[in-house]
Image (cartoon, rainbow, N blue to C red):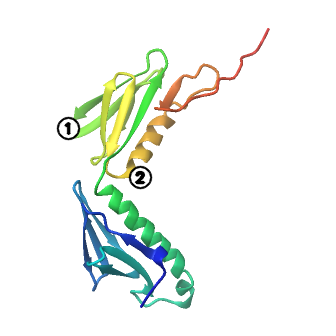
Amino acid sequence: MLYSQKYKIKIPKNVEVLYFLEKNIVIIIGKISKKILIFKTQITINSILKTIEVTPDFFFLTSNKEKKKVKSYQRTSLALIKQAFLEVSIFFHKKIKLIGIGYKSFVNDVFKNKFLILKLGYSHNIYFKIPFNVTITCLKSDKIFISSNCYKEVTQVASIIRSYKLPEPYKGKGILYENEKILLKEGKKI
């Protein structure tokens, strides 16, 4: 059966795709890692053209309510496959800088757990437990480098760290992303 071209995706050269029809499981293997995806819609893989096609047919028996959501399932499945292709082949990273006098960061190992310790002008230090599949390195005491093969986890960890000290608009002190610029407000005039 021929479906729309917008539900087809080309398989990259450095990625291998395994498909188990019985349980509708797709395993995507790349240079860095592998990813396992389970879908509700059926998927066809053309090994000659090296394409994956998400069909509108449901793998499991579903109600009429869910059949109306077929296109949204197709688009979601397609987006998940594209994201998995990226995650198995490249690393994602974010750089964070600390701006302020006395703001410092360093990584410490304690009992097989890694912690990022932040000194942000509070009366106490902030301890952030680093997830096992995310790598955090402190290039200098005021620069943090976060990397992983999962884009969602890199952005989530970066936003959690940034939430400990949001940049303030008057002096510009706080935790900023690498290319972020803060427009400073004027203070009170006497």
Q: Residue at x 69, y 23 (%)?
A: 185
Q: Nearer the viewer, residue 51 or 132?
A: 51
**What is the CA distance from the residue labelled 1 to the residue labelled 2?**
27 Å
Quadrant of the rendered image containing residue 82: bottom left
Question: Relative to 97, is 19 on the left or the right?
Answer: left
Q: Nearer the viewer, residue 188 or 77?
A: 77
Question: Relative to 186, is 16 on the left or the right?
Answer: left
Q: Which residue is mark 1?
A: 111
Quadrant of the rendered image containing residue 142: top left
Numbered badge on residue 152: 2
Label 2: which secondary element: helix
- Tell me how many marks there are: 2
For residue 40, say whether it is visible.
no
Q: Residue at x 34, y 74 (%)?
A: 51
Q: Is residue 150 above or below residue 26?
A: above
Q: Amino acid at mark 2?
A: Lys
